Image: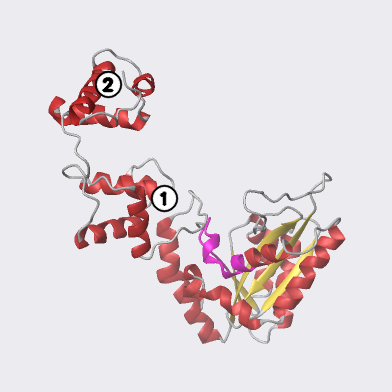
Amino acid sequence: MSKNAKRGDQKTQAYIRNQAVKAVVAKGQKPAVVADVFGVALNTVYKWVRMYKSSGSSALKDNKRGCHKGSRSSLSPEQCKKIKKLITDKNPEQLKMPFVLWTRKAVQELIQDQFSIGMPIRTVGEYLNRWGFTPQKPIKKSYEQQPKEVQKWLDNEYPTIKQDAVKEGAEIHWGDETGCTNKISHGRSYAPKGQTPTLVLSTKEKLKINMISSVSNQGQVFFDIHEGKINSAEFIEFMKKLIRCTDKKVYFIVDNLPQHRSKLVKNWLNENKDAIKLFYLPSYSPELNPDEYLNCDLKRSLNTKRMPRNNSQLKENTMQYMIELSQNSEKVKSYFRHPKVKYAS
């Protein structure tokens, strides 16, 4: 028996396909074993079996070069429009597909499912490129996020906050906490092709400091750095700083961390309601906070500096970057141009 099913004339190839399918369907042999015997890919055996089950033995006779009927690799304008809309509006799991992200393979199977068109993976990539789709690092979003709450925030809650701020002559600030460590979490390193760069890390305990910051779409940035956890008392101290550094009432928007909703914080806010008012983003929605993009920017910058050997050096690196940022209002404003937070600009 030939070890390569592509050799021989069409009659021989048809015979091999029939024998392979017979071995799987009638004799119950494992497809992997059959693929090895006939010298074909495992997916090819599965394909032959599907053809047989769908259209009978007649589907195995013709093996002409080119696309089979119904498997042309071109899409009509209407089909292109539908695929683009599905990729834009849905994720694969919503369409009950076994993928997390829209890879070329996932789009290839989507086209097959929707239109019974078997398209080469390279052609799928060409279509995606033509449509203006590029491979990108996805924004992480929690499963716990409630889309209805997010939409309510975008459509009603934030517009109301913005209107009330105008009426009161208040400034809107966005706050967030982040941890800075000596662990590389962003960035890439150039190296000769085929030689993966090596990052030498200390075997000592991981260094860490915490920072609380705020940004405004006028380009203002304020921050405090702490070596320990940021609790309710330290959160209050930061809000006192905001009040001291601004001439207007502060509308402060933060996430739903427990230290932001504690009794201590609520009592302090009640005592200072003429100077500051606190608002909360929808739960599990960091992408809606402009200050989150400052955090990402900071961590990228820290990765370009010399590796800190102790917390003092880590704090110094963080402080240096934040001071430079506080003097660059245009860069701070750029965080508000991200598609997810343009609503806040």
Asked whether the viewer can see residue 53, the reply is no
Taking the magenta stretch, the answer to whether it contains residue 291 is: yes
Farthest front residue? 8
Q: What type is the residue that disc 1 sits on?
A: Thr
Q: Position of residue 286 (x, y in %)?
A: 55, 60
Few, some or many C-alpha atoms within 10 Å of disc 2 (few <14, some 14-19, many ≥20)? Answer: many
Of mark 2 and mark 1, the one earlier in the sequence is 2
Which residue is painted at 42% across and 57% down in the image? Answer: 147
In the image, the segment drawn in magenta is: 279-294
Which residue is painted at 36% across and 25% down in the image? Answer: 39
- The answer to which image quadrant residue 300 occupies is bottom right
Please state which of residues 329 and 224 is positioned toward the viewer in this rendering: 329
Q: CA distance from mark 2 to mark 1?
A: 31 Å
Please state which of residues 323 and 344 is positioned toward the viewer in this rendering: 323
Label 2 with label 1: CB-CB less than 8 Å: no
154 relative to 228 in the view: left or right = left
87 relative to 203 in the view: left or right = left
Quick one: SS at disc 1? loop
Quick one: SS at disc 2? helix
Few, some or many C-alpha atoms within 10 Å of disc 1 (few <14, some 14-19, many ≥20)? Answer: some
User: Circle 1 sits on which residue?
Assistant: 103
Q: What type is the residue that disc 2 sits on?
A: Ala
191 relative to 77 in the view: left or right = right
* In the depicted structure, whether residue 244 falls above or below residue 208: below
Please state which of residues 91 and 79 is positioned toward the viewer in this rendering: 79
User: Circle 2 sits on which residue?
Assistant: 20
Which residue is painted at 51% across and 71% down in the image? Answer: 338
Image quarter where the N terminus lies is: top left
- The answer to which image quadrant residue 116 occupies is top left
